[in-house]
Every structure is written in structure tokens, then in C-alpha cells.
Image (cartoon, coloured by chain):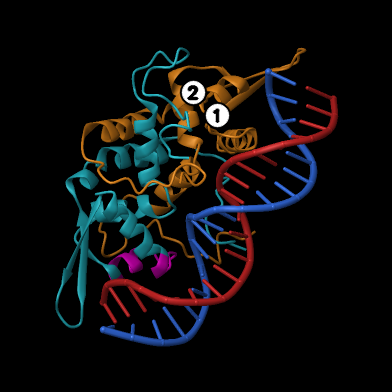
Chain colours: A cyan, B orange, C red, D blue
DNA sequence: CAGTATCCCAGACGATACTG
DNA sequence: CAGTATCGTCTGGGATACTG
């Protein structure tokens, strides 16, 4: 289905139960943009220091494979969060940094980091790592 | 599982390149907690109105299956974000609300919503929906 | 260096049916 | 009502090898 008719999803009009005006699908889209196991990490690193070269990011996030790195990078690029700059040199050099939209994510990342740092977070149901065992 | 020896992951000590003191693994854990296609949505709805019954949440997020709903709910419960309260009645009634830790996510959610609402977000690479095509 | 290509798997996710 | 069980699909993600 065409994503706009058959799927009711959540309307931008306040649901009766919610009574809140923040449109859900907007939030959903935001979520979809940052979804993916590495996206937020990438953004985080780009927030900390930019521009970064491809290999910088690889080094910053050792657990990621090149495939995933480039993949998520591309997705972020498409979503207008990350900007890729290739220098026609040899050896090739490519730099990544955040667009304005990407940089605008800083508060959100900060809030998240804040949350992570501050309190709770007891049991970790996290299944990070590709079978850590 | 050893999860603490075999995987170097990211150290809490600032990497040379970063020179920043926010420990990456903390952020990683935070990410892992809210990762999953429905977690943030669930939290969002619980933030908006709580407590919510299981069926309330089903109605609030029509696209989710019970399986996923309960699954993510459990995960969030384990991570100390959501609290489940079952009333021994018949018919059964179960209510979900946020713990303090969960409620503490509000700023982050707000920041995200803010970001989503405010600017950019042009092309949507989003692959939400089970093959929207 | 910065990718691309290919193969492959685990598990995330969905649909449906069944139960206390 | 609030789940659990089972089965199936899809794709996220990893390993490895190759290229400009």
C-alpha cells in the first residue's frame, strides 16, 4: 500500500485519547530517520568533532563494518542530516559533517546523554553486539 | 555471558580524537534502550497520557502487532522505563505507565519532536511500514 | 583511502490462532 | 482483556574479497 491511504497509522489530528497536538507521524518520521543501530552514534561523533573522514569514523566506532557505516551514512545523507564532501585527490579523501538539520539534533542527543548519565538504567536488556558471546 | 571482556566496544575514557568526556558506552546503552521501532512511540504515548491499558496502546499505535507491543513493553519494563501493573480482576486489567526513569526521557522526546517539527527533513528515506510499497 | 560486491545469518517484525 | 504460541517473511547487519 501506498503509505498514504491504506495505512491509517496515526493521524496528525489529535486523537481523542491524546488530546495533544503534537502530530505523531512527525515524530514517527523523526524516529525513522535516527533509527538504525549506528545512526545516533555517527551523529554523536560528528557532533563532537567534524569534519571526519571515513576512516576516522571507522576508528571512532570500531564495532561497525564498513558496509553498515557507509550505508547508514548514505541514509543520513539522504535524510539531509549528514553532508558528504569528496575531494578529487589521490589518494581519495572524503569528509563528513552535519548539515544544519543534523546539528539541530544536538539538543536531542544531549538530552539523551543526559538521561543516560543521570539516573536509573539498571538492568540492561540491551542486545548490542553481534552475539557478544 | 561475558559481555565485558570479549568486546572492547568503546571505552569510557575519552578517545584521543574525541577529547570529550561523555562516555560513549553510556550513550550506546541509552540508544539500545530506546531502540526498536516502537519503543519511542510507546514512551511518547505514555508520556502523553498514563496509565494506559494494553488495548489503549494497541489503539494508539494501530500499526503494531500485539506481539511486538508486548515485546517492546517487556523490554522497556526490564530496562526500568515502564511499569506494568496487573489488577487481579476478571476480566483482566493491566495498566502501563512510566517509571521515574521513563518520565525522565521527556526532555529527550521533546527535543526530538522539536527537531522533527522545526525544520528540514526533506527526503524521507524512511522504510517504515512492512514494505510500504 | 574509500568504497563496492557478494554471500549469509540472526533476529526483528508481522499474521494468525489459541488461552486463562 | 491481555496476553502466548507458532510460523513465516524481510531486512538489518556482518565477513570477506575486490576495485578505482
Camera sees residue B23: no
Q: Is label 1 in contact with label 2 (beta carbons under 8 Å)?
A: yes
Residue hosting label 2 = B46
- Establish whether labels 1 and 2 are both on one chain: yes
- Towards the viewer: A99 or B2: A99
Q: Nearer the viewer, mark 1 or mark 2?
A: 2
Q: Is residue B99 above or below residue A89?
A: above
- Separation of marks 1 and 2 at Cα, in angstroms: 9 Å
Extent of the magenta region: A55-67
| Spot occupied by residue A94 in the image (x, y as percentages of width and height) | 21, 69
- Towards the viewer: A53 or B78: A53
Residue hosting label 1 = B82
- Give the quadrant of the C terminus of chain A: bottom right
Q: Is residue B13 above or below residue B78?
A: below
Q: Which element carries disc 2, helix, strand or loop?
A: helix
The residue sitting at the left extreme is A88
Amino acid at each position: 500500500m501506498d503509505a498514504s491511504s491504506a495505512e491509517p497509522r496515526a493521524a496528525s489530528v489529535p486523537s481523542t485519547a491524546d488530546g495533544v497536538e503534537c502530530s505523531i507521524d512527525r515524530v514517527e518520521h523523526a524516529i525513522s530517520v535516527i533509527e538504525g543501530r549506528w545512526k545516533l552514534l555517527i551523529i554523536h561523533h560528528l557532533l563532537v568533532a567534524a569534519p571526519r573522514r571515513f576512516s576516522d569514523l571507522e576508528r571512532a566506532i570500531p564495532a561497525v563494518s564498513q558496509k553498515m557505516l557507509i550505508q547508514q551514512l548514505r541514509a543520513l545523507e539522504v535524510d539531509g542530516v549528514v553532508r558528504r564532501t569528496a575531494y578529487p585527490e589521490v589518494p581519495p579523501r572524503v569528509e563528513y559533517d552535519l548539515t544544519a538539520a543534523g546539528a539541530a539534533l544536538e539538543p536531542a542527543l544531549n538530552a539523551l546523554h543526559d538521561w543516560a548519565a543521570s539516573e536509573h538504567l539498571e538492568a540492561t536488556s540491551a542486545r548490542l553486539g553481534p552475539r557478544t558471546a
